[in-house]
Image (tube, helix red, strand yellow):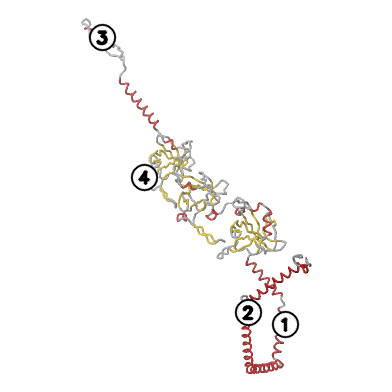
């Protein structure tokens, strides 16, 4: 920096001072001016603000939605549990014009919400058959809700959900998967029951890639998820399960909600296969059509047999039970009408599926009965037959009954169409009908006309005999003979009756005297009578004397000299 300094003129130069020009003198300052500090400070403050703004700025994400209903750029908030974590900054239409792209700026530190499986949806009022949600947005307006995922991978572009998820990630419990042939009336939000208590709900469903089955995701709330074991059975509890079959009338339902929106129920059977093993999350279970199907024992080993009937099977349907002495061991799989070329008749082939594991062998062992090929043949030889019987008089439904009939005609196993053929018997009604028909055939075989003609001839001869005069004379003579017999009986009654009474009186007196004599005789010779006692005593003495004589005779026989010398031998 320079300064212009003016010098005072000398007296000598006063005259020409007016003509002299001023001269500038340059003077350099040693310190810069403070004025330059202002822009430097302003630049530093601006840079610090820029760095701070960039450092505190949150991530920017994009979300694809089907439409922008209720969304406004700069106003719509992004919320997690009703806490603002960002704002929608821009709304654009995709290049293909098939959806909209929502750009949202989140707060600093929101990176933890952006896992690869994070879900976004627009929260707005929704009323469905199973639930009501988003009523708070009637006053506050729609907002973008977020459900953070658990994946370690992050992303910045997401596909928004058309509907809010039924279960969020932070809800305690576990998810399980059900496999079914059809979806039925199940939809997301449908309840899941355990003993008629709601413990979860259906969260999603999808058709498998092969198109053969439907996979249904259900979520069981904690702590009820501990009730799901590896052998737990799930069944469709939608609507009213009304069944008219051979077993009678069956009615089952869960609640009014299940009647309207459907539902799923589950339970763990308490049988020999019960286990305490809890099912892990995402385990796949079969979904049975109803409670009855779920309660049926599971069998991995099944045998199919063919039954051939020649009578009517009206009332027998697919799925009809096959029972052995009242216990179901299988079901009917197929019914077909076939033509027998050899017999020129129509026969009905019934294919049944039997589960031999339902027949226990040796206590707790469950071994298929048909593993030994000779066992079934021996049972058939002992009278095992299949027969159709009525299971429900109201509907006329039939079922297949297996039982032993020792008086059945002999039969053996055979093969037809690749299946073992079990011998059958006609239905009880058909058997009675056959017996009646056989009786009628025998009656038809009788010579009814000849018998009628002979009977007519016999009746004519009998009528001729009855009308003859000889029979009339014989009847008159018989009446006269009967009159004479009556007169003779009257004479006997008046003349012989008093004499017979006198004879009877004498006989009665004689009998009394004989009875008295027998009593006296009994007193004389009775066991305790004196005569009897003396006689006994006398007999004993006679017996003793005879014994002495026998001894003496024996002695004399051995010593004859005793008659002369005496018993002492001469002494």
Q: Which mark is residue 524?
A: 2
Q: CA distance from mark 2 to mark 3?
A: 218 Å
Q: Nearer the viewer, mark 4 or mark 2?
A: 2
Work out which quarter of the rendered image holds the C terminus and state it. Answer: bottom right
Q: Which class describes the residues within 10 Å of circle 3: few (<14), some (14-19), or many (20+)?
A: few
Q: Is residue 71 above or below residue 362?
A: above
Q: Which class describes the residues within 10 Å of circle 2: few (<14), some (14-19), or many (20+)?
A: some
The percent position of residue 480, horizontal first and vertical second, equals 67, 94
Q: Which mark is residue 454?
A: 1
Q: CA distance from mark 3 to mark 4?
A: 86 Å
Dot placed on the residue nearer the N-terminal end, 1 or 2: 1
Tags 3 and 1 touching, CB below 8 Å:
no
User: In the visual, does 469 lie left or right of 251?
Assistant: right
Q: Which residue is mark 3?
A: 20
Q: Which residue is mark 4?
A: 140
Tags 1 and 2 touching, CB below 8 Å:
no
Q: CA distance from mark 1 to mark 4?
A: 112 Å
User: In the visual, does 211 lie left or right of 551?
Assistant: left
Dot placed on the residue nearer the N-terminal end, 3 or 4: 3
Q: Nearer the viewer, mark 3 or mark 1?
A: 1
The percent position of residue 496, horizontal first and vertical second, equals 64, 93
Q: Secondary structure at mark 3?
A: loop
User: In the visual, does 130 lie left or right of 304?
Assistant: left
Dot placed on the residue nearer the N-terminal end, 1 or 4: 4
Dot placed on the residue nearer the N-terminal end, 4 or 2: 4
Dot placed on the residue nearer the N-terminal end, 2 or 3: 3
Q: Is residue 451 above or below residue 369?
A: below
The percent position of residue 427, horizontal first and vertical second, equals 63, 65
Q: Nearer the viewer, mark 1 or mark 2?
A: 2
């Amino acid at each position: 920096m320079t300064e212009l300094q003016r010098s005072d003129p000398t007296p000598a130069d006063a005259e020409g001072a007016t003509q002299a020009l001023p001269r500038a003198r340059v003077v350099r300052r040693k310190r810069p001016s403070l004025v330059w500090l202002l822009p430097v400070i302003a630049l530093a403050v601006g840079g610090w603000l820029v760095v701070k703004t960039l450092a505190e700025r949150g991530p920017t994400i994009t979300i694809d939605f089907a439409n922008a209903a209720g969304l406004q750029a700069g106003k719509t908030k992004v919320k997690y549990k009703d806490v603002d974590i960002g704002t929608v900054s821009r709304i654009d239409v995709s290049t293909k014009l098939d959806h909209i792209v929502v750009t949202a700026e989140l707060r600093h530190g929101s990176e933890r919400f952006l896992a690869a499986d994070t879900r976004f949806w627009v929260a707005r009022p929704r009323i469905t058959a199973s639930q009501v949600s988003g009523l708070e947005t009637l006053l506050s307006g729609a907002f973008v809700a977020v459900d953070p995922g658990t994946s370690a991978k992050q992303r910045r572009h997401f596909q928004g959900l058309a509907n809010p998820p039924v279960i969020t990630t932070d809800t305690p419990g576990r998810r399980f998967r059900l496999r079914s042939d059809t979806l039925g009336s199940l939809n997301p939000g449908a309840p899941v029951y355990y003993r008629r208590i709601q413990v979860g709900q259906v969260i999603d469903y999808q058709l498998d890639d092969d198109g053969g089955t439907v996979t249904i995701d259900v979520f069981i709330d904690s702590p009820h998820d501990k009730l799901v074991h590896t052998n737990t059975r799930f069944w469709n509890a939608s609507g009213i399960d009304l069944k008219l079959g051979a077993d009678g009338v069956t009615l089952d339902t869960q609640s009014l909600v299940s009647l309207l929106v459907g539902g799923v129920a589950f339970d763990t059977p308490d049988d020999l296969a019960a286990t305490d093993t809890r099912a892990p999350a995402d385990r796949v279970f079969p979904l049975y059509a109803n409670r009855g199907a779920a309660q049926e024992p599971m069998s991995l080993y099944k045998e199919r047999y063919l039954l051939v009937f020649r009578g009517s099977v009206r009332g027998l349907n697919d799925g009809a039970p096959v029972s052995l002495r009242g216990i179901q061991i299988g079901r009917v799989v197929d019914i077909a009408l076939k033509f027998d070329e050899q017999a020129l008749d129509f026969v009905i082939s019934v294919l049944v599926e039997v589960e031999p594991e339902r027949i226990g062998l040796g206590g707790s062992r469950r071994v298929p009965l048909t593993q030994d090929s000779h066992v079934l043949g021996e049972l058939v030889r002992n009278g095992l037959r299949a027969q159709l019987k009525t299971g429900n008089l109201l509907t006329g439904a039939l079922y297949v009954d297996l039982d032993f009939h020792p008086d059945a005609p002999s039969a053996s196993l055979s093969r037809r169409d690749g299946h073992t053929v079990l011998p059958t018997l006609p239905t009880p009604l058909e058997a009675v009908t056959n017996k009646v028909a056989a009786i009628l055939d025998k009656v038809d075989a009788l010579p009814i006309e000849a018998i009628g003609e002979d009977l007519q001839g016999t009746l004519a001869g009998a009528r001729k005999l009855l009308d003859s005069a000889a029979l009339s004379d014989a009847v008159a003579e018989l009446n006269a003979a009967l009159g004479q017999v009556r007169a003779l009986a009257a004479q006997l009654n008046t003349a012989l009756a008093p004499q017979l009474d006198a004879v009877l009186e004498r006989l009665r007196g004689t009998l009394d005297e004989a009875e008295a004599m027998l009593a006296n005789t009994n007193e004389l010779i009775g066991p305790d009578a004196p005569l009897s006692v003396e006689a006994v005593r006398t007999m004993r003495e006679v017996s003793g004397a005879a014994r002495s004589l026998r001894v003496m005779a024996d002695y004399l026989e051995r010593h004859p000299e005793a008659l002369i010398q005496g018993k002492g031998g001469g002494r």
